[in-house]
Image (tube, rainbow, N blue to C red):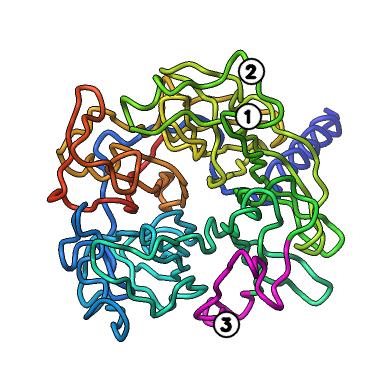
Amino acid sequence: MNNRPMMALAGLALTLSACNLTPVPGSSGLSSGPWTPAAASSVQIASVTGGPWTLAQSSATLAHPLAGYCDTFGAGGKLQNNTGTRLMQPYYFPLITGSGQTLDGYFDYRVKDQDEALVHAASSDGGLTWTPDATKLRLNAGVCPSSDATPIGNDNGQGHAMTLSIPTASGSKRLLYTLDRVAGVADSGGLLIHDVTAGAATLPDSEPVTVATPVPVGVKQTVGLLNPDGILGAIPGTGTSATDPLKVLYLNKPKGSKAAPAAGLDPAKLCVDTQSKPYTTKAANYDRTELRLASTTDGVNFTDLGALSGLNDPNDNASLNGFRYVGPRGTVLRYTDGSYGLFFSGGNCQDGDSDAYHFIGYAHSKDALNWTVDNGAANPLVQVDYSYPSALPAAYSTGRVYSPAVIQNGDGTLKLFYSGYRTGKPLPDTGVATGSPAVTFQGSDPANYRSILFLTLKR
């Protein structure tokens, strides 16, 4: 009997097997498929040990939102630090890397109308507790307001932080991108860029951005991104060498007003005040948002590659289950078959805001450009509740859920981190009926905004 045909077939099988075992560039090691909150998983809220002042340490309230912020108020007062382990407030926009129990994070620390900074922290318990080692890029360092009820009125510093590894001929460099919130620059100028290859400690402690000096001296801005509100993240498997452009998703956010809605919006399909005011006390929003793809070889100059398809519809004006807005923070995974998964935040006319904080969803794609939504407004992974229940931990995210950051647990499950607010506003209007059924918040109610929460996702 001639065994050559069988031997040839065996050789072919081995060759195919070897091809199948070749890792997909940037693969997470996970197979493609939908995700759902684990049945036994409950939402948990993160705490922080040390670092700057927190809302809970002196029981900040809606009437006194800066309780304990300074030892004395006015000239000569000193900012206070968090001396214990307390709820991680007011922190949001988590940027988290690592896996399992050992995690590294950058967080936007933003005290309503008073200050904004970037905090770098680490966790050894899977994100339940964080320990900061740096508070950087502070907007109003050392400034105490006149009282705990009267913030200075400016928290427009640097936010929406994202880091990217940029390949170079001699290795790679790590760049940090932030949104400059100064009026006239935010969502129209470039993102600010800092080199953090040597770590967060190299960032300046204080770096104000002002109308007079919107771009700090010595700081670069991105070139080529359209109206950037932030970079969502890199496309896994790109940017593998100095000659391979890194591809990223970023948010294009043309601003608009009632008198002049953002370009590209259908004037017959705008949001109206009656959709949002009863639920958030916020008037209708007229911005437009879209995620786009771009590439870069140096981390400064970007080439726009077009808008993503299949996600939000900027003209969706439905009050319920609408997907009009998409946010600038999320996570892209690449699976073993080469396809992609995207965790994102979305919003609608009911929110009265373009910050896409109504729900957190999930979509899949074969090419990272054309997407199919699996978990949208009608079946989200997480969503707000405009009845504003007081039960915990839901009360920490009944008004806003957004800026998802996803990490692998190491057992085939994922951990979904996100930001939460008690209401649609950081500090809700007091004495005003809000929500459905209506709730009326009082000045004595706790100030409860910008929390970090997480839950487990499974197949």
The reply, left or right, for residue 1 in relation to residue 272 is right
Based on the displayed image, in which of its 4 quarters is residue 125 positioned?
bottom left
Q: Which residues are magenta?
A: 196-221
Residue 277 in the magenta stretch? The answer is: no
Residue 164, x across and y down, in percent: 65, 61
Q: Quadrant of the N terminus?
A: top right
Kindly indicate whether the residue at mark 3 contacts the one at mark 1 (C-beta within 8 angstroms).
Answer: no
Q: Is residue 203 above or below residue 420?
A: below
Please identify the quarter of the rendering in which residue 371 is found: top right
Q: Earlier in the sequence, mark 3 or mark 2?
A: 3
Front residue of this view, candidates 103 and 264: 264
Residue under label 1, please give it. 261
Which residue is found at the position 58% from the left and 59% from the top?
A: 182
Q: Position of residue 273 (x, y in %)?
A: 43, 23
**Furthest-top residue in view?**
268
Tell whether label 1 touches label 2 (CB within 8 Å).
yes
Secondary structure of residue under mark 2: helix
Q: Marks 3 and 2, Cα distance to the nearest angstrom?
A: 47 Å
Amino acid type, label 1: Pro
Q: Badges 3 and 2: C-beta atoms under 8 Å apart?
A: no
Mark 1 or 3: the one toward you: 1
In the picture, which quadrant includes the C terminus?
Answer: top left
In three-dimensional space, the C-alpha distance between marks 1 and 3, rounded to whole angstroms, equals 41 Å
Q: Secondary structure at mark 3?
A: helix
| Residue at 66% over, 39% down | 254
Alpha carbon distance from label 2 to label 1: 8 Å
Q: Residues within 10 Å of mark 2 (few under 14, many from 20)?
A: few
Q: Say which residue label 3 marks.
A: 202
Tell me the number on the disc at residue 267: 2
Closer to the camera, 237 or 120? 120
Looking at the picture, tell me which residue is in the foreground, 28 or 81: 81
